[in-house]
Amino acid sequence: MERIYLKPTCREVLHKDTGKEGHLDLFAYDYESDEAKRKLGNLYLVGNVHPALASKSGVQMPAEGEKTSENDVAYVTNLVASLAKREYYADPDLAPKEAFSLALKKVNDVVGEFFTNKDIKINIGIFAIAGEQINISKLGKFKIILSREDKNIDILNNIDLFTKERVQEKEFSHVVSGKVAAGDKIFAYYPGRLMTVREKYFKEYLLKLTGDQLLEKINSIKHERPDFSCAALYIGLAKSKGPTVAVKHKVVPTPVPEPEILPEQQEQEAETPKVKLTLKKQPAITEEKTELSEVDMPRIIRSEFSLGKKQNPVQLVFNKIRPFMPRLKNRVVLFVTLLGVIVASALIVKSLFILSPSERQAITAVEAAQESLKLARTKISQNDILGARRLLGDSLSSLAAAPVSSDKTEQTKAELLEVLDGIDQANEVTPALVESLPNSVLQRLSLYQTEAQKLQSNEYNIIGPVAFDIYENNLYVLTADNLFKVSDINKTGKKETASWLKSGTLPPGSRYIAVDGKIYVLSRSGILAVYYRGEKTGEYNTSLLSGDISVFATTKDSKNLYLINKDLNRVYTFSKENGSLVKTIKIGSNEPMIEAYLDPALAGKSGVDADETIYFSTSDGRFWKIQ
């Protein structure tokens, strides 16, 4: 008997570059031949892992002497793929979505140390196709396009056809599910820099071309641009026929022929009389009762026997309450009731008085945050704005790191943010979803990543770079105690590095740099120093905490500087002339901000706040903008 089912046909394309995009890898698993696991379908993974880079976008430089080898980053994708395969197909009796969710939880538990390692950045997309059902989850950047009826559908951002469900508060935290059908074409890939630039053309190819033709187009790009990198899977879905179950052939035992009896043996057997054996019935054995006289068995007097035993207090109490106890048939009900009361009491006592280490840590964090909140209000009354911001920021970070969240934790967070909003005079802005970053941002981001790699490899012979910026094809690098300039970085040939700072010093703890002809240096404690032609021309206290993962940026014709705090989802705009706070934007998004970019293309254009278009990405892999 045959069955008709939906069969995916996968084609892989993997082009690795010289290292700009990090390690790329693909995995595809198929258990079509295994009857027990066949209903779980096919499992796919697209992975990218690379060392973190320092750039204007807020990415940190690794500490001096720390390196991440190719083998280390390749091990991450191999480990995730093998774990996902093993756990997904571990129990064939589970439904595909349930098996997929359990596999993600196991991956989160086992490789969590890689996710928290700041020296590597992980982008992985995992999805499974079982019959007409598709389940998808991702960490970082990953895209999957569905081509159906001459239309392209971005599965991860389509809420009409696909549902998104949170399965765990960890890295692979969401599962996007939906239906696929015969004739669908799926293109899943890591959206690297050059892939993102050509995304529009890939979508057109997906609609018009077959899988082989699409792969030929991608391979032709590799011939034209040797630095082109790509990790993508093309999957075509079509109906197929196959047996429902494997046919088991019945094994028939081979008959054993009876031995042939010779005529002489037949005559001998006929002459031999047959003896019939019978068993005689044995007489029943009767037991005789032995009667004992009163002399042989003395009579025990109850009172005398009890006096010879030591009294048990528990037994005495039990004897006294025995008349009031229920009958035997009701004792089971009483026992079960008492056991339930004891268990419930134990649970109540545990919840009220016995706390786990994580719960105790969370309560301690809440208590410390409440004390900091009181102290912050006192500092505000004393006009110590910087001190108040420091207390509020530290408290919010400690609550975010607490292993357990509760209503008390969320209430304390709300109170801290309310006081911070009052200091910042923040205005909440709802971001707008965009399909991808504009070309101006992508080009600038590519340039910054290239220069970050050169600084990391010490190509410019600058020891301990902290941050850098690019202005008119010149590279300006901030170290702990100096400023350096590398001229004409767009030209070939060896570059000369020169110390740019002629006089004056840098603020203690200098962390960020922005250039527009002048150089602006911002310290961790909010001190803004301005330099022009190697001389310090001003220093101001902004009362802002820059933190370690913020973005500091400006444009040539802008009057303002922008500090984008990714921890707080806020954009601080302050004046270049005197460092005063102009306004604060609070981004209304539940997803944490991962990267942020100031669009240089709008700089100098007419219109109010034309240079304030800021793009950012969130942990779910989507891009947004605010103005």
Image (cartoon, grey):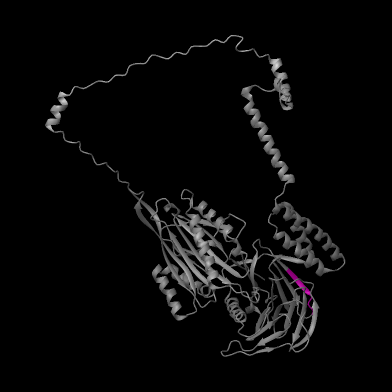
Q: Residue at x 71, y 45 (%)?
A: 351
Residue at 86 percent of width and 63 percent of height: 378
Residue 173 at least partly seen: no
**Left or right for 162, reference 537:** left
Q: Nearer the viewer, residue 431 or 166?
A: 166
Name the side, left or right, on which 64 lies relative to 36: right
Is 581 a magenta residue? yes
Q: Is residue 580 visible?
A: yes
Q: Nearer the viewer, residue 574 or 83?
A: 83
Q: Position of residue 164 (x, y in %)?
A: 56, 56
Query: Which quadrant, please, contains the C terminus?
Result: bottom right
**Eyeballing the image, is 482 above or below 426?**
below
Res 507 quadrant in image: bottom right
Quadrant hosting residue 377: bottom right
How far across and down, in percent of the image, does residue 325 sit? 69, 23
Image-quadrant location for residue 173: bottom right
Q: Residue furthest right?
A: 382
Of 51 and 400, nearer the camera is: 51
The boundaries of the magenta stretch are 578-584
Farthest left residue in view: 263
Instruction: Name the residue at 67% across, 38% down.
Output: 343
Where is residue 204? Give x, y as percent. 46, 70
Is residue 196 part of the magenta span, yes or no? no
Q: Is residue 108 above or below residue 254?
A: below
Q: Where's residue 63, x and y in %?
A: 66, 75
The image shows residue 322, relative to residue 437, as above or below, that is above
Identified at 39% across, 69% down, the residue is 212
